[in-house]
Protein backbone atom coordinates (compact mmCIF):
# COMPACT_ATOMS: atom_id res chain seq x y z
CA UNK A 1 0.00 0.00 0.00
CA UNK A 2 1.43 3.43 -0.95
CA UNK A 3 1.68 6.43 1.38
CA UNK A 4 -1.58 7.94 0.14
CA UNK A 5 -3.40 4.66 0.79
CA UNK A 6 -1.94 4.43 4.30
CA UNK A 7 -2.95 8.05 5.02
CA UNK A 8 -6.53 7.40 3.87
CA UNK A 9 -6.71 4.24 6.00
CA UNK A 10 -5.45 6.09 9.11
CA UNK A 11 -8.02 8.85 8.48
CA UNK A 12 -10.84 6.25 8.18
CA UNK A 13 -9.81 4.58 11.46
CA UNK A 14 -9.71 7.98 13.20
CA UNK A 15 -13.25 8.76 11.98
CA UNK A 16 -14.54 5.38 13.25
CA UNK A 17 -12.93 5.96 16.68
CA UNK A 18 -14.46 9.46 16.92
CA UNK A 19 -17.90 8.15 16.01
CA UNK A 20 -17.62 5.39 18.61
CA UNK A 21 -16.74 7.94 21.30
CA UNK A 22 -19.64 10.20 20.28
CA UNK A 23 -22.10 7.30 20.30
CA UNK A 24 -20.90 6.20 23.73
CA UNK A 25 -21.55 9.73 24.98
CA UNK A 26 -25.09 9.64 23.55
CA UNK A 27 -25.77 6.36 25.32
CA UNK A 28 -25.19 7.83 28.77
CA UNK A 29 -26.98 11.13 28.11
CA UNK A 30 -26.82 14.00 30.60
CA UNK A 31 -24.65 13.49 33.67
CA UNK A 32 -26.84 12.14 36.43
CA UNK A 33 -29.35 10.64 34.00
CA UNK A 34 -28.18 7.09 34.57
CA UNK A 35 -27.52 6.76 38.27
CA UNK A 36 -27.09 3.48 40.08
CA UNK A 37 -28.65 3.00 43.48
CA UNK A 38 -26.59 2.47 46.61
CA UNK A 39 -27.40 2.54 50.30
CA UNK A 40 -26.83 6.30 50.44
CA UNK A 41 -28.65 7.31 47.25
CA UNK A 42 -32.25 7.13 48.47
CA UNK A 43 -32.85 10.83 49.21
CA UNK A 44 -29.61 12.26 47.82
CA UNK A 45 -31.29 13.91 44.82
CA UNK A 46 -33.80 15.90 46.88
CA UNK A 47 -31.56 18.93 47.51
CA UNK A 48 -30.64 19.24 43.81
CA UNK A 49 -33.94 18.01 42.35
CA UNK A 50 -35.29 20.31 39.64
CA UNK A 51 -38.99 21.02 39.97
CA UNK A 52 -41.49 20.47 37.18
CA UNK A 53 -45.21 20.57 36.34
CA UNK A 54 -47.45 18.52 38.67
CA UNK A 55 -45.02 18.67 41.60
CA UNK A 56 -46.85 19.88 44.73
CA UNK A 57 -44.97 22.27 46.99
CA UNK A 58 -45.52 23.18 50.62
CA UNK A 59 -44.57 26.85 50.86
CA UNK A 60 -44.34 28.35 54.33
CA UNK A 61 -43.81 32.04 55.05
CA UNK A 62 -43.31 32.24 58.80
CA UNK A 63 -45.81 34.56 60.48
CA UNK A 64 -47.87 34.82 57.27
CA UNK A 65 -50.62 32.19 57.40
CA UNK A 66 -52.38 33.64 54.33
CA UNK A 67 -49.30 32.93 52.18
CA UNK A 68 -48.42 29.54 53.63
CA UNK A 69 -50.11 26.85 51.56
CA UNK A 70 -49.78 23.88 49.20
CA UNK A 71 -49.12 24.92 45.60
CA UNK A 72 -49.25 22.67 42.51
CA UNK A 73 -46.95 23.65 39.66
CA UNK A 74 -49.04 24.22 36.54
CA UNK A 75 -48.31 23.13 32.97
CA UNK A 76 -46.36 26.34 32.35
CA UNK A 77 -44.11 25.64 35.35
CA UNK A 78 -45.61 28.32 37.61
CA UNK A 79 -47.33 28.69 40.97
CA UNK A 80 -49.68 31.51 41.95
CA UNK A 81 -48.80 33.04 45.32
CA UNK A 82 -50.94 35.74 47.00
CA UNK A 83 -49.46 39.27 46.86
CA UNK A 84 -46.79 38.40 44.26
CA UNK A 85 -48.85 36.50 41.66
CA UNK A 86 -47.40 33.96 39.23
CA UNK A 87 -43.90 32.71 40.00
CA UNK A 88 -42.00 30.50 37.54
CA UNK A 89 -40.47 27.63 39.50
CA UNK A 90 -39.99 24.81 36.96
CA UNK A 91 -36.32 23.94 36.61
CA UNK A 92 -35.47 25.41 40.02
CA UNK A 93 -34.50 23.64 43.24
CA UNK A 94 -36.55 24.20 46.40
CA UNK A 95 -33.74 26.42 47.76
CA UNK A 96 -33.90 28.56 44.61
CA UNK A 97 -37.68 28.88 44.96
CA UNK A 98 -37.23 30.03 48.56
CA UNK A 99 -34.86 32.73 47.32
CA UNK A 100 -37.11 33.86 44.42
CA UNK A 101 -40.28 34.02 46.55
CA UNK A 102 -38.39 35.75 49.39
CA UNK A 103 -37.03 38.40 47.00
CA UNK A 104 -40.48 39.08 45.53
CA UNK A 105 -42.08 39.38 48.99
CA UNK A 106 -39.25 41.63 50.17
CA UNK A 107 -39.94 43.97 47.25
CA UNK A 108 -42.61 46.09 48.94
CA UNK A 109 -44.65 43.50 50.86
CA UNK A 110 -42.76 41.97 53.81
CA UNK A 111 -39.61 43.42 55.35
CA UNK A 112 -37.72 40.19 56.15
CA UNK A 113 -39.68 37.18 54.85
CA UNK A 114 -38.59 33.79 56.14
CA UNK A 115 -39.57 31.34 53.37
CA UNK A 116 -39.34 27.56 53.43
CA UNK A 117 -40.24 25.33 50.47
CA UNK A 118 -40.41 21.54 50.39
CA UNK A 119 -41.83 19.07 47.91
CA UNK A 120 -45.00 17.54 49.31
CA UNK A 121 -45.76 15.26 46.34
CA UNK A 122 -43.54 14.54 43.37
CA UNK A 123 -44.93 14.21 39.87
CA UNK A 124 -45.62 10.60 38.82
CA UNK A 125 -43.44 8.35 36.71
CA UNK A 126 -44.61 6.34 33.70
CA UNK A 127 -43.76 2.81 32.64
CA UNK A 128 -44.66 1.56 29.15
CA UNK A 129 -44.20 -1.51 27.00
CA UNK A 130 -43.63 -5.08 28.13
CA UNK A 131 -44.90 -4.90 31.72
CA UNK A 132 -48.16 -6.42 32.95
CA UNK A 133 -49.76 -3.12 34.01
CA UNK A 134 -48.25 -0.21 32.04
CA UNK A 135 -49.29 3.28 33.07
CA UNK A 136 -48.71 6.17 35.46
CA UNK A 137 -47.63 5.56 39.07
CA UNK A 138 -46.99 7.79 42.10
CA UNK A 139 -43.31 8.48 42.64
CA UNK A 140 -41.64 7.02 45.72
CA UNK A 141 -38.28 8.13 47.08
CA UNK A 142 -35.36 5.85 46.20
CA UNK A 143 -37.25 3.78 43.62
CA UNK A 144 -35.18 1.88 41.02
CA UNK A 145 -36.09 0.49 37.61
CA UNK A 146 -36.41 -2.97 39.17
CA UNK A 147 -38.92 -1.78 41.77
CA UNK A 148 -40.81 0.29 39.17
CA UNK A 149 -41.26 -2.87 37.09
CA UNK A 150 -42.51 -4.70 40.20
CA UNK A 151 -45.04 -1.90 40.87
CA UNK A 152 -46.26 -2.35 37.28
CA UNK A 153 -46.93 -6.06 37.86
CA UNK A 154 -43.60 -7.39 36.60
CA UNK A 155 -42.28 -8.17 33.13
CA UNK A 156 -44.36 -9.91 30.48
CA UNK A 157 -43.07 -13.17 29.01
CA UNK A 158 -41.79 -11.29 25.96
CA UNK A 159 -39.93 -8.51 27.82
CA UNK A 160 -36.29 -7.63 27.30
CA UNK A 161 -35.34 -7.67 30.98
CA UNK A 162 -31.67 -6.69 31.07
CA UNK A 163 -31.99 -3.11 29.83
CA UNK A 164 -34.72 -0.49 29.47
CA UNK A 165 -34.83 3.08 28.15
CA UNK A 166 -35.49 6.06 30.39
CA UNK A 167 -36.65 9.43 29.08
CA UNK A 168 -36.03 12.28 31.53
CA UNK A 169 -36.61 16.02 31.35
CA UNK A 170 -34.14 18.21 33.22
CA UNK A 171 -35.00 21.90 33.01
CA UNK A 172 -35.80 22.62 29.35
CA UNK A 173 -33.95 19.60 27.96
CA UNK A 174 -35.06 16.01 27.47
CA UNK A 175 -32.63 13.09 27.57
CA UNK A 176 -33.06 9.44 26.67
CA UNK A 177 -30.66 6.71 27.76
CA UNK A 178 -30.31 3.00 28.36
CA UNK A 179 -30.71 2.01 32.00
CA UNK A 180 -30.10 -1.09 34.12
CA UNK A 181 -32.28 -2.56 36.86
CA UNK A 182 -30.50 -0.63 39.64
CA UNK A 183 -30.88 2.78 37.94
CA UNK A 184 -32.67 5.31 40.13
CA UNK A 185 -35.99 6.54 38.78
CA UNK A 186 -36.75 10.26 39.07
CA UNK A 187 -40.13 12.02 39.17
CA UNK A 188 -41.56 12.44 35.68
CA UNK A 189 -39.41 9.70 34.14
CA UNK A 190 -40.82 7.52 31.38
CA UNK A 191 -39.48 3.96 31.46
CA UNK A 192 -39.82 1.88 28.28
CA UNK A 193 -39.54 -1.91 28.43
CA UNK A 194 -39.02 -3.40 24.97
CA UNK A 195 -39.98 -6.75 23.50
CA UNK A 196 -37.10 -9.19 23.08
CA UNK A 197 -36.38 -10.55 19.63
CA UNK A 198 -36.17 -14.24 20.57
Image (cartoon, rainbow, N blue to C red):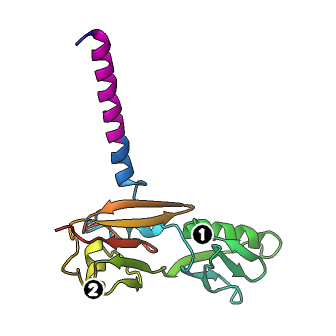
Indicate which disc residue 44 carries: none
In the figure, is residue 5 to the left or right of 103? left
What SS does tag 1 mark?
loop
Q: Nearer the viewer, residue 68 or 32?
A: 32
What SS does tag 2 mark?
loop
Residue found 29% across the figure and 16% down from its top: 5
Q: Does the segment drawn in magenta span residue 17?
A: yes
Q: Quadrant of the N terminus?
A: top left
- Identify the image quadrant of residue 135: bottom left
Q: Nearer the viewer, residue 84 or 35?
A: 35
Residue 120, percent across and down? 50, 83
Q: Nearer the viewer, residue 88 or 76?
A: 76
Which residue was labeled with disc 2? 132
Residue found 38% across the figure and 81% down from its top: 140
Residue 189, percent across and down? 42, 72
Residue found 33% across the figure and 20% down from its top: 8
Which residue was labeled with disc 1? 90
- Identify the image quadrant of residue 32: bottom left
Q: Which residues are magenta?
A: 3-21
- Main structural element of the magenta stretch: helix, strand or loop? helix
Residue 139 in view: yes
In the figure, is residue 23 to the left or right of 195? right
Q: Quadrant of the C terminus?
A: bottom left
Q: CA distance from mark 2 to mark 1?
A: 33 Å
- Are there few (<14), some (14-19), or many (20+) residues within 10 Å of tag 1? many
Amino acid sequence: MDRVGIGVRVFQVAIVVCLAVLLAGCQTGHSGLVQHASATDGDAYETSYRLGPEDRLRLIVFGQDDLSNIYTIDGDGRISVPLIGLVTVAGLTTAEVESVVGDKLRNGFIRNPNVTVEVQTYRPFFILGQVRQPGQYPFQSGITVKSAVAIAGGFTDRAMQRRVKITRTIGAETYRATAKSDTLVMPGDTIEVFERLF
